[in-house]
């Protein structure tokens, strides 16, 4: 019997409603293909994690981190490894960079979108085993 793991979609919906100021400001430049014609989604589940922003066609994840991320560097590294194992590139920005230089952050994102082709999906087509040694237990 196949057992499906529940995706955290309700949590993602809640995060969309309670976005941080930095996430709201960055989102003004990303929806409706405003940035280079690329489509972005926000607060999207990827496996057991929820990324802040995602461009599926370019396989790019954007994470916006506040000061609390200094204390959770190991958890962020785990999330990044998981996203990469699923075939995504990950770019992280600090809240103060987004709030103080939104246009510069958008320029960096656009450069990442256009500079290199997206990584190939994992050879198995499934990515890492979510029950592997680096994944948190649910």
Image (cartoon, helix red, strand yellow):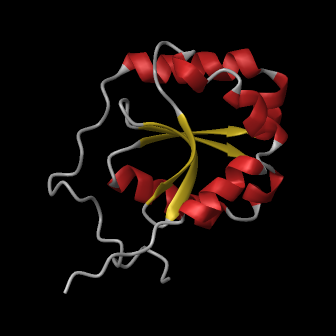
| Picture quadrant of residue 6 | bottom left
Q: Most extreme residue toward the bottom, as rendered?
A: 1
| Picture quadrant of residue 2 | bottom left
- Residue drawn at 67 percent across, 23 percent down: 105
Would residue 73 appear left or right of 25 to someone viewing this image? left
Image x and y of residue 17, in percent = 75, 49
Would residue 105 appear left or right of 41 to someone viewing this image? right
Image x and y of residue 138, in percent = 50, 82
Would residue 63 appear left or right of 21 to someone viewing this image? left
- Residue drawn at 37 percent across, 79 percent down: 133
Q: How many numbered tags mark residues here? A: 0
- Would you place residue 19 above or below residue 34 in this image? below
- Would you place residue 75 above or below residue 122 in this image? below
- Would you place residue 35 above or below residue 100 in this image? above
Would residue 40 appear left or right of 15 to someone viewing this image? left
- Residue drawn at 61 percent across, 56 percent down: 12
- Residue drawn at 34 percent across, 22 percent down: 116
Image x and y of residue 74, in percent = 60, 66
Instruction: Look at the image and tell me in which quarter the N terminus lies.
Output: bottom left
Image x and y of residue 61, in percent = 50, 41
Q: Most extreme residue toward the left, as rendered?
A: 124
């Amino acid at each position: 019997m196949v057992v499906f793991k529940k995706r955290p979609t309700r949590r993602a919906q809640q995060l969309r409603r309670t976005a941080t100021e930095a996430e709201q400001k960055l989102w003004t430049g990303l929806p409706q293909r405003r940035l280079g014609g690329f489509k972005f989604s926000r607060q999207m589940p990827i496996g057991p994690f929820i990324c802040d922003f995602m461009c599926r066609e370019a396989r790019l994840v954007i994470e916006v981190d506040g000061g609390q991320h200094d204390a959770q560097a190991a958890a962020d590294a785990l999330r990044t490894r998981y996203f990469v194992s699923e075939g995504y590139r990950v770019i992280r920005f600090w809240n103060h960079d987004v709030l103080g230089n939104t246009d510069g952050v958008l320029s960096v994102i656009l450069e990442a979108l256009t500079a290199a082709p997206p990584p190939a999906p994992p050879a198995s087509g499934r990515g890492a085993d979510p029950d592997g040694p680096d994944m948190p237990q649910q």
